[in-house]
Amino acid sequence: MNSKPTISIVVPVYNEELVLPELYQRISVVMAQTGEPWELLLVNDGSRDRSAEVIGQLHSQDGRVKGISFSRNFGFQIAATAGLDHAQGDAVILTDADLQDPPEVYPQMIAKWREGYDVVYGIRKSRVGETWFKLVTSKLFYRLIYRITSIDIPLDTGDFRLMDRRVIDAIRQMPERNRFLRGLVPWVGYKQTGIEYERQARFAGESKFGGVRQMLPFALDAITSFSYIPLQLATYLGFTIAGVSGLAILMVVLVRLLGPQTPLLGQATTLVAVLFLGGVQLISLGIIGEYLGRIYDEVKGRPLYLIDKRWGIEDEEVKG
C-alpha cells in the first residue's frame, strides 16, 4: 500500500462532491485492469460544498487516494500545478473531475507511454453535452493560439494528458503565475503523441468553466504567455496610422492649394479622426498593460498556492 506508485492521477476539484465517488470507482476499475501501482491525487481548489469531506472519506477507505485542500480558490491551472508538485508516480495523468474525460482511456495512454512516448494527450473527437457557444469559441481559440504562438499546441486538446516524470520535473522548474499548462507541456518538448477519444457529458453538477468570465482571462493568459503578436500588432497599427496620416496631410494641403473647400475637411472629420486615434491609443495601452500586469505578478514573488489540509501527503514546504 505504501509502495511508490507507477501512475499518478491528478484531479483538480472544485465543488464536485457528487462526482468524486463515481470518479474513484471508475478509476479503481480501470487501473485494476492495467495492473499498474497507482495513486489518485485530488486537489481541492477551495470548494464551497462537501468536496473536502468526501476526499477525506475516500482516503480513509483507500490509502491510494490522497488529497490536498487549498486555503482558498486559486484556479484550475494552479490546482493542476499543485497536483504535479506532489505526484509521486513515474507518469502522471492529468484530468478533470467531471468524468468528461473518461478513465477508460487511461490504458491507451499508458500503452503509448510504455512504447516510449513522454507525453500522450487526448484529442477530442467529439464533445457531448456542450453548448454551441462553447464548441465554436473553443475551436476558434485553439486555431488562434496555433497560429500566433511560437510552439506547436495540438488542436482540439485540453489538459487531459499523460506526462512522463521527466516532463513533470521540467514543468516544476517553471514557477510562472499566469499558467497555461496546455502550452507549457508542448514547450518542454520530448516525444509526444495524441490519441482520439469521445468526450462525454458531465456526470453530475454544473460546469465551472464555460462562461465568458472564465474563458476570457484563460485566453489572455495563453496568448500573453506564448506570443508577442499583440504587442507587434500595436506597433504595426501605429506605423500604419502614421502612414495614413501622412497621406491625409498631403491630401489636405493639395486640396487647400488647388481645389475648393469641401465638407470632408470640416469639424466632423476632425472629430472622427481624433476619436479613432484615441481608441487606437487606448487599445495599445491596454495590450501593454496586460503584459505589464503579468510582469508585476511575477516580481511580487508570492507562492503559487497555500495548502490548508493534506490527506496521505506529508507536510512539506509550500512550493511556488
Image: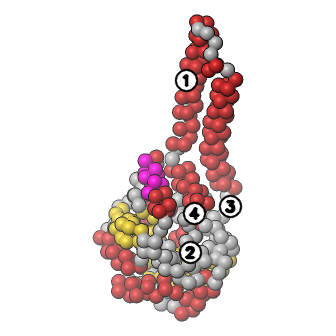
Mark 4 vs mark 3: give the one in front.
4
With 220 as the anchor, is 37 left or right in this view?
left
Q: CA distance from mark 2 to mark 3?
A: 31 Å
Q: Is residue 61 visible?
A: yes
Q: Which residues are magenta?
A: 139-147
Instruction: Write down the residue under mark 4.
Output: 211
Q: CA distance from mark 3 to mark 1?
A: 44 Å
Q: Main secondary structure of the magenta part?
A: helix
CB-based contact (under 8 Å), mark 2 and mark 1: no
Decide which of tag 4 and tag 3 comes sooner along the chain. 4
Q: CA distance from mark 1 to mark 4?
A: 40 Å
Q: At x 53% / y 33%, what residue is drawn?
A: 236
> Quick check: 55 above or below 246?
below
Q: Residue type at mark 4?
A: Gly
Instruction: Write down the residue under mark 1.
Output: 243
Decide which of tag 3 and tag 1 comes sooner along the chain. 1
Q: CA distance from mark 4 to mark 3?
A: 28 Å
**What secondary structure is marked by label 1?**
helix
Q: Residue type at mark 3?
A: Arg
Q: Is residue 249 magenta?
A: no
Q: Front-most of 168 and 290?
A: 290
Decide which of tag 2 and tag 3 comes sooner along the chain. 2
Q: Front-most of 199 and 13?
A: 199
Residue situated furthest left in the rendering: 115
Instruction: Write down the residue under mark 2.
Output: 206
Q: Front-most of 42 and 320?
A: 42
Instruction: Write down the residue under mark 3.
Output: 302
